[in-house]
Image (spheres, grey):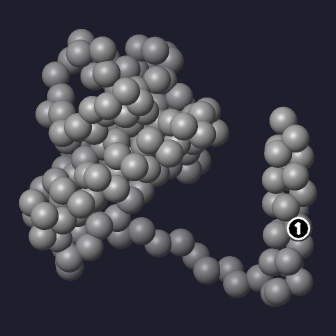
Amino acid sequence: MPMFVDTSPPGHCIFCKIVAGEIPAAKVYEDDLTIAFMDIGQVNPGHVLVASKRHAVTVLDLTAEEAAAVMQTAQRIAHAAQQAFAPDGITLFQANGAAGGQTVFHFHMHVLPRHEGDGMALSWPRKEPAMPLLQHYAKQLQTALQSTAQL
């Protein structure tokens, strides 16, 4: 994970300053809801960050429209990266909260062109719970989905 952590208060974060044009960025794309710009900590050529223009800290703070717009922009950038850099693959990475690996607390998604042996790794321990426990987890989420649908 990157070593940079932005501790600026909401509305004054580094991405808000990029959106406002207060600091320079190598912009790739912009629309009403999103902005895409080169990550200064390039993993590989074409590593782009897609951020919501409105300050939202995590995916939970986005509106449904903003969430859809970020994914649509990420897909556009992925197509462009495929054409421009011919990577072996593309990783979309998005982290929420410090425990989730988020280092800039303004919602954003990484679009990472990938190449065999590029040194980038995403891994986690497989725990493989039994099917009854998986079904229990599914029921918990179904119940939560029902309660949030009523909001």
Q: Nearer the viewer, residue 73 or 24?
A: 73
**Residue at the farthest left position:** 84
Residue at position x 81%, y 78% from top? Answer: 134
Q: Nearer the viewer, residue 62 or 1?
A: 62
Asked where in the image residue 65 lies, by quadrant, the reply is top right
Can residue 97 be seen here? no
Residue at position x 37%, y 33% from top? Answer: 34
Residue at position x 51%, y 36% from top? Answer: 66
The picture places residue 76, in percent across and down from the top left corner, at 29, 52
Please indicate whether residue 3 sits to the left or right of residue 128 in the image.
left
The picture places residue 60, in percent across and down from the top left corner, at 64, 39
Please indicate whether residue 96 sits to the left or right of residue 17 in the image.
right
Tell me the amino acid under the disc marked 1. Lys
The picture places residue 72, in percent across and down from the top left corner, at 40, 49
Residue at position x 89%, y 72% from top? Answer: 136
Q: Nearer the viewer, residue 11 or 122?
A: 11
Q: Is residue 135 above or below residue 77?
A: below
Viewport quadrant of the C terminus: top right
Can residue 11 be seen here? yes
The picture places residue 30, in percent across and down from the top left corner, at 27, 32
Q: Nearer the viewer, residue 96 or 86?
A: 86
Asked where in the image residue 62 lies, by quadrant, the reply is top right
Q: Disc 1 designates what residue?
A: 139
Asked where in the image residue 140 lies, by quadrant, the reply is bottom right
Number of other residues with Cα within 10 Å of mark 1, as a class: few under 14, some 14 to 19, many 20 or more: few
Please indicate whether residue 57 sits to the left or right of residue 149 in the image.
left
